[in-house]
Amino acid sequence: MSEGTGLGRRLLDHLLTESVRDLGAHAAGLYLVAPGRQVLALDTLTGLPAEFMAPWQRISLAYPAPVTDAVRSRELVWVASQEELVRRYPRAALVLPYHFALAGAPILHGDTVMGALLLMWPGPRHDLVPSVRAGIASVCTLLGHVLAAARHTDRPPAPLPVARSLARPTAEPPASPADAVAAYARRLPEPGVALGLDGRITFITPSAARLVGADRQKLIGTLPWESLEWLHDPVYEDRYRAAVMSRRPTFFTARRPDGARLRFELFPDDTGISVRITPAPSPADGGTVWPRRTGEGAAMTEAPVRVGALYRLMHLAGALSEAVGTEDVVRLVADTVLPAFDAQALAMLVAEAGRLRIVGYHGYPAETMDRFDGTPLTSPTPGVRALTQGAASFFASREELDRAFPARADRWDGMSAWAFLPLTVSGRPVGTCVLGFTRPHPFPAEERAALASLAGLLSQALDRARLYDTEHALAQSLQTGLLPHTLPDVPGMEVAARYLPATHGMDIGGDFYDLIRLDATTVAAVIGDVQGHNVAAAALMGQVRTAILAHATAGAAPDEVLARTNRLLTGLDPGLFTSCLYARIDLAAGTAQVATAGHLPPVLRGPDGTAEAVEFEPGLLLGIDPRAGYPSHTLALPPGSVLALFTDGLVESPDRSLDTGIAGLARDLACGPVELPALADALTAPVRAAGDRTDDVALLLLQPTG
């Protein structure tokens, strides 16, 4: 919300700070919906330095986080502990490995989402009592009214470019060194150091200054890990962050340049941190010692790496590790990287046949991408230079880009600032990532370093994704050739089939089905499942289908079809096992002779509408024992009945057993639609709705019509 909204701004600040005190929280953050964008932007924070929340300064509403989940569900999201954060939001837990509890709540005005409220408590915390839940709801209602009222002013609410940090009413910064001493004495009656919540030294005793070997006056107002060279290590700053985030005491042991070890004990509260410093005689004192990486007594010449920058890269790395294909990489970068750096557009380019090809983009019009796609690698463009020279380029304005590449100045893409990041894998250039900004954008040194590191993560992710896409295309082509394109038209019988591949892995499986016309009144139906979800499983599936087809058309009985196929597979020794059910259906007699090799039993719906699984003795899986036998069973299949053959992906899930799933399928079959295509859709609807599938699904419905 802009700084100039006056009364509205003061009301929001008051509500935020008072909600922390009244609800017993130690920190709170106000997120606003960015105008015209599916993004939550952190506007104001109290109880924590704003840099702690840098990875979540801007969050895509598609990104999994407590505040975005709260906005999407329009309900309060409660995370009681670090363990629960790890389970539900692993990316956030990677960047915030501290003990605290948090709540995310939507801020609504009528049906309009205005933003979200983030609250944090020292954790773990079992649950929110009803009064606290009611208090959160009241605060969000008031925030919604204030934000809605501000929309009718000359300056409607808009997220600030950088989140503000508010001091809590009970945590005003010390007005003088004497006040800092008094605050320190209230927290800890021993000499040491007092830090503000921002980590800066507000007071240090003479004895503590002697221990760390620095002048007291030069330390006041500085960050310890910046003013003391031997504390230039992210792990020390991380311990400070742990104390502020969790409001729990913590400690570490560090080594001075002369080799002496010091133990730092941090005691936080809502006003700051009291630090007790004592000599540590040996590394076995129970603390953690991180030796200097630059050697005893050596001076640090490079700038220290801030833990915030490391956590931001870890945050992005965690997101990219979930990417599978190129589309996933582009989506995750758009959801995670663009909001983090306040960029609006993205293009991923790779080198192919002497040209730059666009493999994915976000925020750019399609016609713009068509114009840039296929740029020759000899062209004087920043994208080509980033690829060929392996160096990142940053242009804070259109004028900077025009000066550097005047020959390409007419190729305007609608942006006003750009970052061109080279993508390199094992020293091999693979492409360029372009980030576009709609407004001029300065690139500070820290941001350039973060983007350069990000380029390395993107390179690995894109290389893996393109390899997956290639294998995926091969697998899809293989499976398309192995499964039947159409089923034969059988007079006297209606047939419906559905196949859903697993959504994880190669998106290809070993489930198969087939319908074989034997003569004018006889047909064979087969369904099976080869172990695994990869190209090897699909290839073996093709061999099984071919063998069954050959033995079936030769006139073999069901038990012989499976026995002969089993002997063939055992001889091939593929290392994979196969379940299979074979049914020979005599339409004239109204019967089906069935044999199974470890496959699930079929479910039969009679003409009267009742349905149940048909249980009979199964044989061993194919490919185990060449001497295995496969008993056959004959069942009545009169006109109007429906025989359902299926694989376990249709009935098995982590939260239910096979028996429960088969019983549920029988119920759905009994009350399902009369028309066979509609019935097939109804039976597979639950697994389609589930989205993520770890197993393939095959279904074959057979109905004699008489």
Image: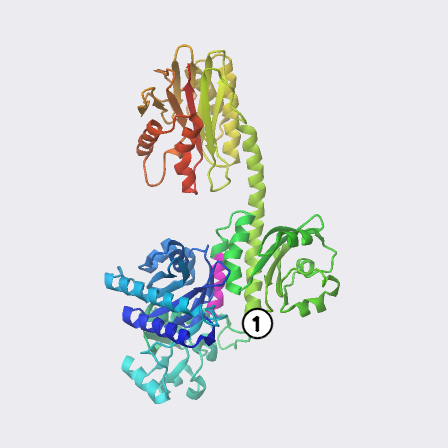
Q: Few, some or many C-alpha atoms within 10 Å of disc 1 (few <14, some 14-19, many ≥20)?
A: few
The residue pinned by badge 1 equals 444
Residue 242 visible in the displayed image:
no
Residue at 64% x, 69% y: name it: 397
On screen, residue 415 above or below 227: above
Disc tally is: 1
Q: Main secondary structure of the magenta part?
A: helix
Left or right for 125, reference 317:
left
Instruction: Please tell me which residue is depicted at 43% across the width and 43% down the height of the picture.
Output: 692
In the rendered structure, does residue 308 fall within the stretch colored magenta? yes
Residues shaded magenta? 306-317
Magenta stretch contains residue 164: no
Looking at the picture, does residue 370 appear above or below residue 339? above
Q: Quadrant of residue 173?
A: bottom left
Name the spot of residue 293 as percent of width and height, x first.
49, 70
Identify which amino acid the numbered label 1 is placed on. Pro
Front one among 284 and 334 = 334
Relative horizontal placement of residue 226, taking residue 205 as reference (left or right): right
Q: Residue, x 33% and y 29% (percent of image)?
A: 671
